[in-house]
Image: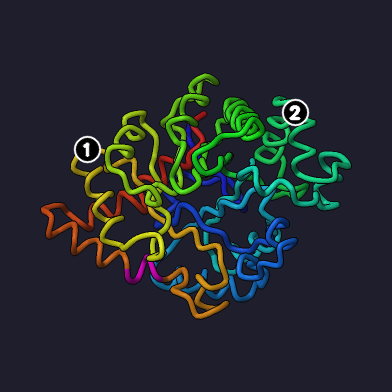
Amino acid sequence: MSFIRTLHGDIDPKWLGFTYSHEHIVCRPPYWQEKGEDDLLLDDKEKSLRDVLDFVKHGGNAIVDATAVDYGRDVEAVADIARRAKIHIIGTAGFNKSFLWGAKLGEKIQKIVGPYASYYEWIETATVNELAEFVVQEIEVGLEGTSYKGGQVKFGTGYNRIDPLEEKTIRAVARAHHETKAPIHSHTEAGTMALEQIEILRSEGVDLSNVSFGHMDRNPDPYYHEQIAKTGAYLCFDSIGKIKYGPESTRIHCILELVRKGYEKQILVSGDTARKSYYKHYNYGLGLEYIISKWVPRFIDEANRAGFDGERLIDLFFVENPSRCFAFKK
């Protein structure tokens, strides 16, 4: 029997509904706090809530909050937003990428993992299996000592590189996946190193159909996308609206190329909205309503012009595919 684990309990996958597959809602990343990068601090629950309500107003039902332990989660705030907005939110256990790990480890996390000075010291000192057990506890008991359980496990790597500690967290997350059956999400920096991540996951015996790879549109290479899709993994196009990385026409072209090759059931779409300047109610950005209200109609139009059924593809990308991707298969 499969189920999806949300912050407010397990649900039947058919109840997930229209889903953004990679977002950040309330977070204060320690690394960016120490650097004074205010734009990267989503630190006002009420403003975040207003953007979530915009998404709900347009028909949104669920969000995957991809904020891991090293990115300054506020689990209680996000759970409260889920309750007040009457929306499903999936929380994330695991880790992000190594350049974040030089930040100081907060007292709350120290009480759980030990008195390490930084994330780096903790991850370097702990064994793979100790890190795996931490991730398991976040799935089966609760995130950061709360009662709100994670619904996916995550790892990440840097731009065109995987350092030894990142490989360590990949292996820890893979082992936590085997124990919990939680789906896996990968952060690929600028869309790189997915194939190398796949080699490590395979060495840990992971079935790639349980994995989603983020930031695929940051590396708009249809051949590369096809190699990932051949493994059975999901590809998340999660930079929608970020024209600084490329026009929407490029993203839509890459998505339709995968559709042409028969991989439409492995595509996810989201915005990775992780800056105040991306949020409407923080700093007048496009906001969480943009994809569902503006991008979806454009995609339907372009897909129809290309000879596809655009509305059917949207249902796959935002409803059916997430309901399979984020399911625990026990």
Task: Examine the image and state in which quarter residue 29 appears.
Answer: bottom right
Residue at x 51% of width, y 63% of height:
273
Q: Position of residue 23 (x, y in %)?
A: 52, 57
Give the secondary structure at mark 2: helix
Q: Residue at x 46, y 52 (%)?
A: 21
Q: Residue at x 31, y 55 (%)?
A: 251
Query: x, y percentage for residue 257?
Result: 22, 45
The amino acid type found where label 2 is placed reads: Glu
Q: Which residue is mark 1?
A: 262
Give percent across and percent down for residue 136.
68, 34
Residue 173 figure quarter: top right
Outermost front residue: 160
Disc with the residue nearer the chain's start (1 vs 2): 2
Q: Is residue 183 above or below residue 305?
A: above
Query: In this image, 11 relative to 130: left or right?
Result: left
Q: Which residues are magenta?
A: 290-294
Other residues around mark 2 within 10 Å, as few (<14) / some (14–19) / many (≥20)? some
- The alpha-carbon separation of the residues under discs 1 and 2 comes to 40 Å
Q: Residue at x 73, y 57 (%)?
A: 30
Q: Identify residue for label 2.
A: 130
Q: Amino acid at mark 1?
A: Gly
- Secondary structure state at the residue bearing disc 1: loop
Q: Would you say the residues marked 1 and 2 are in contact, meaning their CB atoms lie under 8 Å apart?
A: no
Q: Is residue 99 above or below residue 17?
A: above
Instruction: Report how many numbered discs are placed on residues in the image.
Output: 2
Q: Position of residue 277 (x, y in %)?
A: 53, 73
